[in-house]
Image (tube, coloured by chain):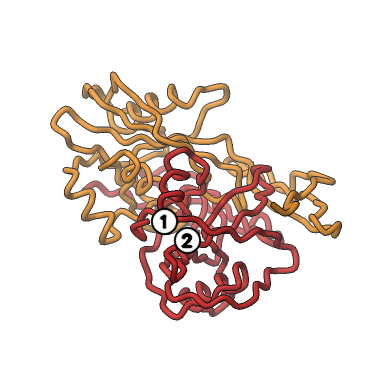
Chain colours: A orange, B red
Amino acid sequence: MSNLIEKSLVSKEVFKGNLLNVFSDQVELPNGKKASREYIKHPGAVAVVPITQEGKIVLVRQYRYPIGKLLLEVPAGKLDKGEQPDECALRELEEETGYVAKNIKKIASIYTTPGFTDEIIHLYRAENLILSKPSPDEDEFLDVELYTKEEIKEMIADGRINDAKSMLALLLAGI
Amino acid sequence: MSNLIEKSLVSKEVFKGNLLNVFSDQVELPNGKKASREYIKHPGAVAVVPITQEGKIVLVRQYRYPIGKLLLEVPAGKLDKGEQPDECALRELEEETGYVAKNIKKIASIYTTPGFTDEIIHLYRAENLILSKPSPDEDEFLDVELYTKEEIKEMIADGRINDAKSMLALLLAGI
C-alpha cells in the first residue's frame, strides 16, 4: 500500500455557527507539498429502523430546508454531549415517533460524507415497540408514518426513499 | 399530511471557502415562529461501481483528512460546473482508476446529509471496462484495488467498507 497519509500542520476554526463549525487546516501531502483541507466538525449521530409488533416500519416525513423537499427518513438525530449512541437512538426514537423500544441492536456505523465532514452515523434496529407520546424538538415538525416491508422495498427502488442513511439502515436491517 | 414546509425569509452566505460555502437562512416554521437554518451549498457529485470483465469490483483507497483514516470507496467526485452526471461519472472513473467504461447505467440519486447540505450523489454502475492510465487531481492520492463480489460483501458486513455512498452504491448495484 502506498503512503497516502496527509499530515496536519495547522488547524484553524474559520466559521462557528449554531449548527456548523467549519475548520480549514494546512496539511502536508504524501508528496511533501502543502494543501488546505476544509471540513465540518460534527458530534456524530444515530439512525434507527423501528419495527412494530405487526412488522410495520416507522418512518418520519420532514421538511429538509437545505434541499427544499419533504423526505421520508428513519428516525435519527445528533448525539448530545457525552451521550452514548444506543441511549441517543432510544431517545430520538421516542422523541420523534413516540415509540419506546425494548430491544435495540447496532447494525453498523457509517461515514456520511468523509470528504468534508467527520460525521459518523450509528445505525440501529429497534424492536418490541410500545407507543407512548412523541415530543419533537421545538423547531422540529414531522409526520410519523407506518409502512410494510414491501412498501419500503418499492420506495427504495423507485426513489421515494432517497435519504442515504435511511436507505442503508433499511437495507442493512434486512427490510 | 401536515403542513411541514419551512418558508425562507432571508438567505445569507456566512462563510465562503475554497471547498465549502456556508449559508445561514432565517425561516418561518410551520407554526409561524422563526428559526435559523445553516447549511452547505454543494455542486452535487457522482459515485461509480466499476465492474471489470472478470467480474472484479474496482475500489479506491484514500486518506480522508476530516476523519483521519484511510477509507475504501467506490470512485467518486464532484460535478464540474455545467457537467452532466453521466459525463462526470466516466471522467472520475478514468481519472481515479484509469478505467474507461463502455457502458454506464444510473442506479439511483441519494441525499447524503439533508440536515446540513443539499449534496446529491448520482450512483452509477459501469461495465465493459478498458484499462487506460489514471490521472488523479494534483492533490489527490489514492490506491486502486480490485475485489471479488464475495470480498465486497464481507467487507460491508464487517465494516471494512463504511463509507455510506460506497455501501449504498455497491448494495444497489446488486454486488
Q: Which numbered disc, 1 or 2, marks the residue that appears first in the sequence?
A: 2
Relative depth, front residue between B91 and B109: B91
Residue B34 in sight from this viewpoint: no
Q: Kindly identify the residue that appears in the image at 41 percent across and 47 percent down.
A: B153
Q: Position of residue B49 (x, y in %)?
A: 45, 63
- Where residue B57 is drawn, which disc sits there? 2
Does residue B38 appear to the left or right of A124 in the view shown? right
Marks 1/2: CA–CA distance? 9 Å
Q: Secondary structure at mark 2?
A: strand
**Kind of residue at badge 2:** Ile
Kindly indicate whether the residue at mark 2 contacts the one at mark 1 (C-beta within 8 angstroms): yes
Q: Position of residue A87 (x, y in %)?
A: 43, 22
Q: Position of residue B37 (x, y in %)?
A: 51, 48
Mark 2 crowdedness (10 Å alpha carbons): few <14, some 14-19, many ≥20: many
Q: Position of residue A129 (x, y in %)?
A: 23, 24
Q: Kindly identify the residue that appears in the image at 37 percent across and 53 percent down.
A: B171
| Chain letter, disc 1 residue | B
- Where residue B170 is drawn, which disc sits there? 1
Q: Secondary structure at mark 1?
A: helix
* Residue B46 versus residue A16 in the image, above or below: below
**Kind of residue at badge 1:** Leu
